[in-house]
């Protein structure tokens, strides 16, 4: 068996699977203390610390003048990418932009007959930072991360967007990252990564001005830096290992289901891939397909470890119990691989994103369709949402009270203030309606 097998009759049996998935918390070891020292160092020494860390871990010949990517380098990166690939990136960017444009909120006002005006002002943050992981030394450029993080900020109207990404051994960024930045019209790029890049974005250095919100995936050091800096900056979320849960019926293709499970398992040994079905024969077929497809998968060592530790096939009595289990898991990605997904989608309460039917595998959303692929993990879809335009905006309440309002309600307001023993609050109102 490539992964554990479970049989559940109802919610009383959900515990073992939930415990298995909860065990994926990355062991922080001493990451928090290391990151605290990095944050302090960057705060105190700025660019000097960035150069020291980058030359130690990424590029031995790195110098301060290498931090900022020049316009010429961005143009050269774009020129190095085949036109056919540029066209694909442009189309994906268009789809992502169109989806997020629908999320944009407007300021609103609620006038009253007495002249009082209440409302909410929606404004973008002044500056956002987008972290783009290096991806195997920069040789597997995470283009989609840049698109998914920067485009919502642009739609929100953020006037300044800074992109950081660790350099390759030769001190360059992958041309595909530069090309994607060029397509988006981004010009502020820095060759710097890990926790020190997050520190620079949060506190600022001579070369990298501070931002208000930092988004983007990363390793345990990036994630820990973001967590420690909450309050100094806004962040997208504390993301854990990737995960997928599939609810399938007898109409599903076991080869497709196995491929979908592997699409997440290949990410990380801590990733989770779960297939739930009332069809026991289908689950057996899925396991056979997993073994078959693992054999020639380039990242089969990672995928096999992920499936062995955190994969599962789960037999349920019917699709309704399956849906209850899915909501209990609250997966990052949820595929409804059933004959009629629309009959079940109304029962989805907790999932980062839902993929409908047999022809909508998770990578459709990861790269191209438009919805954001930065999604809540580790069960946090119970209370949190995908990265969106709202990540880069803030809402300011507006209260415009007419004299008649204070005259009519001032005594009540003062009474509430005195119940809280806040006399100055009461007097602040009373001085406006008492002679």
Image (tube, rainbow, N blue to C red):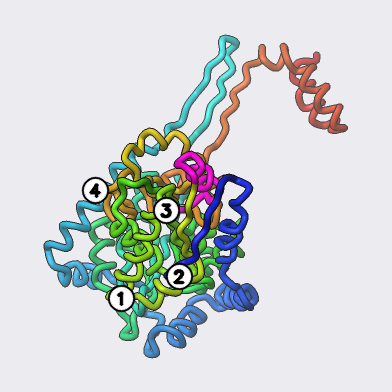
Q: Are the two marked residues, 1 and 4, in contact with CB atoms closer than 8 angstroms?
A: no
State the image coordinates of residue 324 (x, y, percent, origin top left). Answer: 53, 43
Dot 1 or dot 2: first in sequence order is 1
Q: CA distance from mark 2 to mark 4?
A: 34 Å
- Relative to residue 307, is residue 73 drawn left or right? left
Which residue is denoted by mark 1 in the rendering? 295
Which residue is denoted by mark 3 in the rendering? 280
Q: Given this view, does label 1 or label 4 mark the residue nearer the observer? A: 1
Q: Which mark is residue 306?
A: 2
State the image coordinates of residue 88 (x, y, percent, origin top left). Answer: 18, 57
- Relative to residue 177, is residue 425 drawn left or right? right
Q: For mark 3, does the 10 Å Cα neighbourhood hold few (<14), some (14 to 19), or many (20 or more) residues?
A: some
Q: Residue, x 19% and y 72% (percent of image)?
A: 76
Dot 2 or dot 4: first in sequence order is 4
- Kindly report the secondary structure that dominates the magenta region of the rendered protein: helix
Which residue is denoted by mark 4 in the rendering? 94
**What are the residue bounds of the magenta stretch?**
317-332
Q: Given this view, does label 2 or label 4 mark the residue nearer the observer? A: 2
């Amino acid at each position: 068996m490539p992964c554990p097998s479970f049989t559940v009759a109802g919610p009383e049996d959900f515990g073992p699977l939930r415990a298995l998935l909860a065990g994926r918390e990355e062991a922080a070891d001493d990451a928090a203390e290391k990151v605290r020292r990095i944050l302090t160092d960057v705060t105190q020494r700025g660019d000097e610390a960035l150069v020291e860390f980058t030359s130690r871990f990424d590029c031995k010949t790195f110098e301060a003048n290498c931090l900022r990517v020049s316009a010429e380098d961005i143009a050269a990166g774009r020129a190095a990418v085949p036109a056919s690939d540029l066209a694909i990136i442009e189309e994906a960017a268009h789809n992502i932009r169109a989806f997020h444009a629908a999320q944009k909120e407007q300021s609103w006002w609620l006038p009253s007959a007495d002249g009082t005006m209440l409302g909410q002002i929606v404004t973008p943050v002044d500056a956002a930072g987008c972290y783009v992981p290096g991806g195997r030394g920069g040789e597997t450029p995470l283009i989609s991360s840049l698109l998914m993080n920067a485009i919502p900020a642009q739609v929100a109207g953020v006037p300044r967007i800074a992109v950081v990404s660790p350099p390759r051994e030769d001190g360059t960024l992958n041309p595909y990252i530069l090309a994607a930045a060029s397509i988006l019209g981004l010009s502020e790029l820095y060759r710097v990564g890990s926790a020190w890049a997050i520190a620079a974005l949060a506190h600022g250095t001579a070369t990298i001005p501070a931002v208000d919100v930092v988004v983007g995936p990363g390793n345990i050091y990036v994630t820990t830096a973001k967590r420690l800096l909450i309050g100094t900056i806004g962040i997208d979320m504390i993301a854990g290992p990737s995960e997928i849960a599939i609810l399938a019926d007898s109409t599903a293709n076991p080869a497709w289901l196995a491929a979908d499970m592997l699409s997440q398992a290949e990410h990380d040994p801590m990733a989770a891939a779960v297939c739930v079905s009332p069809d026991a024969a289908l689950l057996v077929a899925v396991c056979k397909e997993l073994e078959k497809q693992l054999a020639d998968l380039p990242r089969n060592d990672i995928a096999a470890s992920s499936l062995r530790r955190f994969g599962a096939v789960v037999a349920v009595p019917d699709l309704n119990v399956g849906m209850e289990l899915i909501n209990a898991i609250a997966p990052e990605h949820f595929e409804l691989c059933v004959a009629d997904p629309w009959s079940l989608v109304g029962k989805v309460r907790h999932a980062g994103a839902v993929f409908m039917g047999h022809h909508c595998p998770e990578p459709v959303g990861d790269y191209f369709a438009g919805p954001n692929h930065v999604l809540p993990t580790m069960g946090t879809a119970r209370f949190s949402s995908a990265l969106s335009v709202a990540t880069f905006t803030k809402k300011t309440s507006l209260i415009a009270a007419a004299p008649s309002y204070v005259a009519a309600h001032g005594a009540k307001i003062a009474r509430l203030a005195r119940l809280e023993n806040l006399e100055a609050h009461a007097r602040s109102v009373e001085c406006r309606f008492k002679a």
